Amino acid sequence: MSPTDTLKQIASAAPEAVLEAPTGSFPELQQQLEAQGYFVTLVDRAPVFDKTTLLHALYQSCEMPGYFGFNYDALLDSLSDFSWKTAKGYVLVFKNFGLLERRSPQDAALLLEIVKEARTERDTPLWLVLLR
């Protein structure tokens, strides 16, 4: 999938919560989506390999409020309601999701489920983009 394909999917409000884009395409995705009013962030600025590093990375990259509870229920609530961050939609980008999948497959799977639930069941304009 090309960066253009990913951009088209997001712009058309693709129902899929998890998308893929080529490695190295983050700057282009960020520039074009932010110009359209989306909040775009790189989640794994530092290595993410377990629940603790995942929740801290999401807290920091999404600029979550101080009352964030650092558990998966709090993550679902936060990803379902970005009231502290007004945008047309929210795009969370992982450059090395494979590290989390290898080191903590249960946390990787749970994150995907949480994003899908926030996107589909709670109708949040949210996408997780995995650079591969």
Image (cartoon, rainbow, N blue to C red):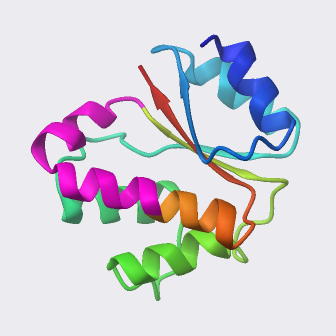
Instruction: Give the side of residue 62 with respect to residue 131, left or right.
Output: right
Quarter of the figure with residue 125: bottom right
Q: Position of residue 110 (x, y in %)?
A: 34, 61
**Who is closer to the viewer here, 34 or 92?**
92
Whole-percent x, y for residue 107 in the image: 25, 58
Query: Where does the magenta region start and end?
Result: 95-113
Q: Residue 18 appears in which quarter of the rendering?
A: top right
Chief secondary structure of the magenta span? helix
User: Is-magenta flag for residue 108?
Assistant: yes
Given residues 53 and 80, the one toward you in this image is 80
Task: Give the side of residue 83 with respect to residue 100, left or right.
Answer: right
Q: Which quarter of the figure is the C terminus placed in?
A: top left
Q: Is residue 29 above or below residue 94?
A: above
Q: Is residue 68 above or below residue 61?
A: below
- Residue at 36% of width from left, 76% of height from top? 72
| Most distant residue in the left direction | 103
Count of all numbered marks drawn on residues in the image: 0
Q: Is residue 18 left or right of residue 69?
A: right
Q: Is residue 72 above or below residue 57?
A: below
Q: Residue at x 20, y 57 (%)?
A: 106
